[in-house]
């Protein structure tokens, strides 16, 4: 079990936790320096997707709509299946 956890995390849980804390501090410092907030990224991605939906997919017609609707189901299922079948 320990080997599987280490393989999934890429290192021991303790070292992974330390790395995540250090990276979180660096990212937090950079975000604070530039005055960014986490919700700014969420709203930016949301605004981008809405703009893409209103302008980009209108040009593609129904094909783009079908691809996007299908991807909202297929991609999460693919990720979940990959996590359940993880054996590397």
Image (cartoon, grey):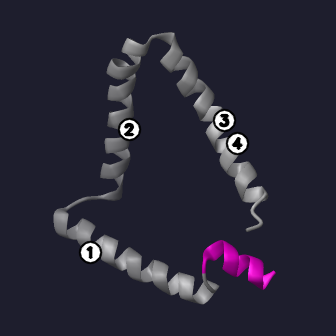
Q: Dot 1 corresponds to which residue?
A: 29
Helix, strand or loop at disc 3? helix
Q: Are marks 4 and 3 in contact (CB under 8 Å)?
A: yes
The span from disc 3 to disc 1 (Cα, nearest Å) is: 36 Å
The span from disc 2 to disc 4 (Cα, nearest Å) is: 22 Å
The span from disc 1 to disc 4 (Cα, nearest Å) is: 35 Å
Q: Is residue 5 magenta?
A: yes
Q: Dot 3 corresponds to which residue?
A: 74
Looking at marks 3 and 1 on the same chain, the residue that comes earlier in the sequence is marked by 1
The span from disc 4 to disc 3 (Cα, nearest Å) is: 5 Å
Quarter of the rendering occupied by the N terminus: bottom right
Task: Measuring from the top left, give residue 7's x and y in whole percent.
Answer: 68, 77
Q: Which residues are magenta?
A: 1-10
Looking at marks 2 and 3 on the same chain, the residue that comes earlier in the sequence is marked by 2
Residue 17 against residue 59 in the figure, above or below: below
Looking at marks 1 and 4 on the same chain, the residue that comes earlier in the sequence is marked by 1
Q: Dot 4 corresponds to which residue?
A: 77
Q: Nearer the viewer, mark 2 or mark 4?
A: 4
Residue at horizontal 39 percent and vertical 14 percent from the top: 58
How many other residues sit within 10 Å of disc 1, few (<14), some (14-19) or many (≥20)?
Answer: few
Helix, strand or loop at disc 1? helix
The span from disc 2 to disc 1 (Cα, nearest Å) is: 24 Å
Q: Dot 2 corresponds to which residue?
A: 46
Main SS of the magenta segment?
Answer: helix
Q: Nearer the viewer, residue 49 or 11?
A: 11
How many other residues sit within 10 Å of disc 3, few (<14), some (14-19) or many (≥20)?
Answer: few
Q: Are marks 2 and 1 in contact (CB under 8 Å)?
A: no
Task: Measuring from the top left, give residue 60's x and y in whole percent.
Answer: 42, 14
Residue 53 against residue 46 in the figure, above or below: above
């Amino acid at each position: 079990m320990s080997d599987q956890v280490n393989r999934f995390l890429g290192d021991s849980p303790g070292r992974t936790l330390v790395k995540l804390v250090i990276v979180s501090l660096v990212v937090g410092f950079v975000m604070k320096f530039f005055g960014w907030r986490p919700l700014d990224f969420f709203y930016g991605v949301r605004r981008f997707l809405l703009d893409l939906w209103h302008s980009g997919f209108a040009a593609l017609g129904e094909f783009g709509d079908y691809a996007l609707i299908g991807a909202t189901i297929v991609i999460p299922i693919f990720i979940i299946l990959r996590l359940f079948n993880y054996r590397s």
